[in-house]
Image (spheres, grey):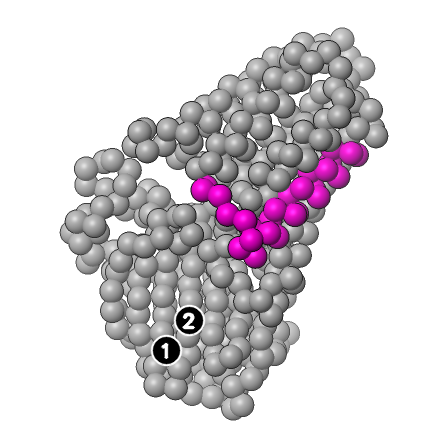
Amino acid sequence: MASAHALSASYTTVTFDKDKTDFTFSLDVISIIESMDVDTNGDGILQEDELEDHKHKLEEWIDDSVVMEMNGSEQAGELLEIKLEQNNDKEVVTWHYTYPAFEPGQTVSILDGLYSQATSSPYVNLITAHNGSQVSETVLQGKSRTWTMLLTEDQQQQQLTSSSNSSNPETQSPSSQNEGSSTMGTTSDWFSFFKLGMNHILTGYDHLLFLFALLLRKQKLKQYISIITAFTLAHSITLTLAVLGWISLPSRLVESAIALSICYVALENIFRKEIRFRWVVTFLFGLIHGIGFSGILRGMNLPKTHLAADLISFNVGIECIQLSIVLLLLPILIYFQKKSFFKPTVTYGSWVITTLGAVWLVQRLFEPLLR
């Protein structure tokens, strides 16, 4: 793939109405092509005729993998359509189902078994549920693949649960529920967004490589602190603005600029005799990286009522991993900076980083031609 991001994301939207329950499930085309033999001509693009030819296979795949339950009993939904569409600038396939209406006092669950056989799948499912004016959202990831909502009499309280293997909500006690559970009219599972932020940067190899390139060259502790601070501030600003919809750039341009940032910093490590004002370069490139971080949340269309909490949780998750990496790397780098072999190691290492960044840059710039 052209992107160095290994994270595969689906988006589920559930709307509870008085006469029916509307259910849509969207998954990016790249994940589908990698999972199923649907790209007949092998061009890396899912065409409308290819979708039509494989509709039955795609229907069975999701019917078997994504299940809706009521009080522990699987519900039969009616598939209205399967279609290609755009989620921001990402092409996705959307399955649109309708289910019978649910009543107050009933427990509704969604079980996502997609890629559940994979031992270390980076797949996540971002769920948004609408119940009248109330909105709840959570993220299913890792082994936590069950989402549960209790519809109450006044339709104002919802109970949100993410659990790994409890497929029957009636058998759960409050003490056995996942740490993301809550009971309120409009809820957000903050811990699931915190984990999403951590997973997002851990699977974002380009962001990690950029960070490593920034730290690799010998610098004073004050310079290291200014670099880390500049990167944090910059990507936090554009992450927020992008999720709010105030700025928007094509993903191909953003991903290409991220690859370019890796090349630039690595070449600076090789050719600059003295590293000065690196925090300025870090801040400028950090603005681009922030837009890259925002892509997965923009597709979720988070409600404004708790957008701030979701953004903060997501960003804190990113920062926790970033800070952990820095705290782990810096002592090691500072120790080896005293060794005679450190300088040539930086040079050769930076050439390797430049090569990786250049490969990603070419792939991302010419992705349509490479398909």
**What residue appears at the point 28 percent right and 38 percent down from the top-left corner?**
44
**What residue appears at the point 29 percent right and 32 percent down from the top-left corner?**
371
Is residue 264 found left or right of 89 in the rendered image? Answer: right
Whole-percent x and y of residue 341? 72, 10
Q: In the image, what residue type sits under mark 1?
A: Thr
Q: Taken as a whole, is the magenta stretch helix, strand or loop?
A: helix
Whole-percent x and y of residue 123? 46, 50
Q: CA distance from mark 1 to mark 2?
A: 7 Å
Q: Between 224 and 120, which is closer to the camera in this rendering?
A: 224
SS under mark 2: strand
Whole-percent x and y of residue 185? 58, 79
> Could you classify mark 2 by the number of other residues whose Cα lies within 10 Å: few (under 14), some (14-19), or many (20 or more)?
many
Decide whether residue 247 is among the magenta residues: yes
**What residue appears at the point 72 percent right and 37 percent down from the top-left corner?**
230
Per the rendering, the mark at residue 21 is 1
SS under mark 1: strand
Decide whether residue 306 is among the magenta residues: no
Q: In the image, what residue type sits under mark 2?
A: Val
Q: Between 323 and 172, which is closer to the camera in this rendering?
A: 323
Q: Which residue is mark 2?
A: 14
Q: Which residues are magenta?
A: 225-251
> Could you classify mark 1 by the number of other residues whose Cα lies within 10 Å: few (under 14), some (14-19), or many (20 or more)?
some
